[in-house]
Image (spheres, rainbow, N blue to C red):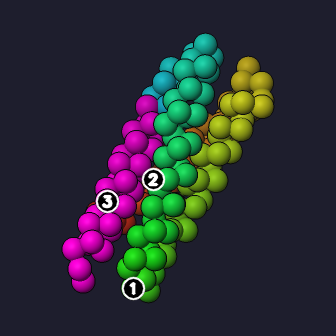
């Protein structure tokens, strides 16, 4: 293994970890703000999701693919496959919650519950990924 390859992998891994920290931090922050049950915070939450969470949820899978191209043997490990599946589901829940926030009336209690459920499932998915990676 040469130094250029090792440096490339480390840069991509660093981007992956920074994206994960940004995504988890934003998801936690949005959940805390949302728990105040103040509908006036909708603009703040949408701004956080759009400017931090959406780019992170794009760059994390992208950097993950680049890392797996560089180190194909990672894809043969069972926990990595579970991590990828949970990560993709988390992206889905994140985007579903954002679409509820943008396209639905947040004054409706049922819509608020669906938004909260999607946010919590996304946060759970991110937490599971951190636990999976932390133990392996």
Would residue 87 appear left or right of 106 to someone viewing this image?
left
Q: Within the image, what quadrant is residue 131 found in?
A: bottom left
| Residue 45 shows up from this direction | yes
First in sequence: mark 1 vs mark 3: 3
Distance CA(mark 2)–CA(mark 3): 22 Å
Q: Is residue 15 left or right of residue 7?
A: right
Front disc: 2 or 1: 1
9 lies left or right of 108: left
Q: Is residue 117 left or right of residue 79?
A: right
**Image label count:** 3
Secondary structure type for disc 2? helix
Does the magenta-highlighted stretch encompass residue 130?
A: no
Q: Quadrant of the C terminus?
A: bottom left
Q: According to the image, label 1 marks what residue?
A: 73
Mark 2 burial class by Cα count in 10 Å: few <14, some 14-19, many 20+? many
- Report whether residue 78 is seen: no
State whether residue 28 is above or below residue 121: above
Quick check: 129 above or below 106? below
Q: Which residue corresponds to the image point at 53% horizontal and 44% vertical from the top-left?
A: 55
**Marks 1 and 3, Cα distance to the nearest angstrom?**
19 Å
Q: Which residues are magenta?
A: 1-29
- Label drawn at residue 126: 2
Measured along the vertical axis of the image, is residue 89 above or below residue 105? below
From the image, state whether disc 1 or disc 3 is nearer to you: 3
Residue drawn at x 30%, y 74% is 5
The x and y percentages for residue 85 are 55, 68
On residue 11, the disc is 3
Q: Residue at x 40, y 77 (%)?
A: 70
Element carrying mark 1: helix
Expressed as whole percent of the image width and height from the top left, the position of residue 25 reads: 39, 39
Residue 86 rendering spot, x and y as whole percentages: 52, 63
Residue 13 falls within the magenta-colored stretch: yes
């Amino acid at each position: 293994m040469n130094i250029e390859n090792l440096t490339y992998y480390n840069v991509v891994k660093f981007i992956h970890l920074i994206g994960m920290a940004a995504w988890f931090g934003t998801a936690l922050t949005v959940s805390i703000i949302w728990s105040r049950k103040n509908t006036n915070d909708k603009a703040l939450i949408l701004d956080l999701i759009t400017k931090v969470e959406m780019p992170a949820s794009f760059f994390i899978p992208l950097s993950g693919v680049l890392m797996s191209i560089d180190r194909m043997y990672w894809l043969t490990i069972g926990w990595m496959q579970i991590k990828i599946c949970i990560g993709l589901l988390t992206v889905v829940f994140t985007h579903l919650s954002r679409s509820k926030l943008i396209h639905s009336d947040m004054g409706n209690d049922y819509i608020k519950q669906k938004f909260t459920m999607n946010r919590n499932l996304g946060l759970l998915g991110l937490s599971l990924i951190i636990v999976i990676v932390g133990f392996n």
